[in-house]
Image (spheres, rainbow, N blue to C red):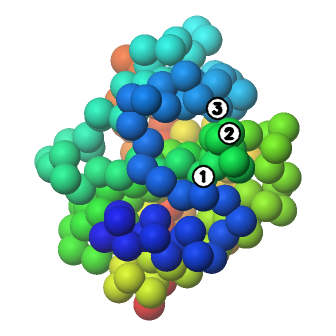
């Protein structure tokens, strides 16, 4: 599905979309560092290179490696957005967004919204019924962002993040 997702998105967005690999480590780190405010919500230190690139290989509990995809959105050769997702997780026809980041110097808030809206539209075309994600409870900015895209808070819990336990909100959006 990720190959289809990337291929379809390449036809529908202004960026080149491809799966990220360790060849993109430096760009992944730069993009995540540009979003340090997000990471500061649950880390007591600045994001390290190792922590940033670990996202390429980390897989959610009870998921398989072949369910994980980490897509990059490039403006020419510059990584301007990334989308870390799990297909059919935690169940069939559900996509779990692990992380969606954009370069705040390159991508405006409106472009960030438009890009994710296009991703959601494409996921729906590919038979995804539900999209879920988790946010730190203190992340009011992203909560408003996802609520504007019609995500709804469905539960609150504690989750292990960056070596500690963080209060989080699980969001969900039905696509069909």
Q: Is residue 84 above or below residue 17?
A: above
Q: Which quadrant would residue 53 be assigned to in this image?
A: top left
Q: Earlier in the sequence, mark 2 or mark 3?
A: 3
Q: Residue 17: image x %, image y %?
A: 54, 58
Which label sits on residue 78?
A: 2
Q: Nearer the viewer, residue 79 or 109?
A: 79
Q: Is residue 93 left or right of residue 13?
A: left
Position of the N terminus by quadrant: bottom left
Q: Secondary structure at mark 3?
A: helix
Which of pointers 2 and 1 indicates the residue nearer the eye?
2
Which of pointers 1 and 3 indicates the residue nearer the eye?
1
Q: Is residue 25 above or below residue 48?
A: below
Q: Which residue is mark 3?
A: 31
Q: Secondary structure at mark 2?
A: strand
Q: Secondary structure at mark 1?
A: strand
* Alpha carbons under labels 1 and 3: distance apart: 11 Å
Q: Nearer the viewer, residue 125 or 168?
A: 125
Q: Which residue is the extreme one toward the bottom?
A: 176
Q: Earlier in the sequence, mark 1 or mark 3?
A: 3
Q: Which residue is mark 1?
A: 73
Q: Which quadrant would residue 54 be assigned to in this image?
A: top left
Position of the C terminus by quadrant: bottom left
Which of pointers 2 and 3 indicates the residue nearer the eye?
2
* Labels 2 and 1 touching (C-beta < 8 A): no
Residue at 15% over, 49% down: 64
Q: Tell me if mark 3 has few (under 14), some (14-19) or many (20+) residues whose alpha carbon lies within 10 angstroms of its own.
A: many
Q: Residue 155: image x %, image y %?
A: 44, 58
* Alpha carbons under labels 2 and 1: distance apart: 8 Å
């Amino acid at each position: 599905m990720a190959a289809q997702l990337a291929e379809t998105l390449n036809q529908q967005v202004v960026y080149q979309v491809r799966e990220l690999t360790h060849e993109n480590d430096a760009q992944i780190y730069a993009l995540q560092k540009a979003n340090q405010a997000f990471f500061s919500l649950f880390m007591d230190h600045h994001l390290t290179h190792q922590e940033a690139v670990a996202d390429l290989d980390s897989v959610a509990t009870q998921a398989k490696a072949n369910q994980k995809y980490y897509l990059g959105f490039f403006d020419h050769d510059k990584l301007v957005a990334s989308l870390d997702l799990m297909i059919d997780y935690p169940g069939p026809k559900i996509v779990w967004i692990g992380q969606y980041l954009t370069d705040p110097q390159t991508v405006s808030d409106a472009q960030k919204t438009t890009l994710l809206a296009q991703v959601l539209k494409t996921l729906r075309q590919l038979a995804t019924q539900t999209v879920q994600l988790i946010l730190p409870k203190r992340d009011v900015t992203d909560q408003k962002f996802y609520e504007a895209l019609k995500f709804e808070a469905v539960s609150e819990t504690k989750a292990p993040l960056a070596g500690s336990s963080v209060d989080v909100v699980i969001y969900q959006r039905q696509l069909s």
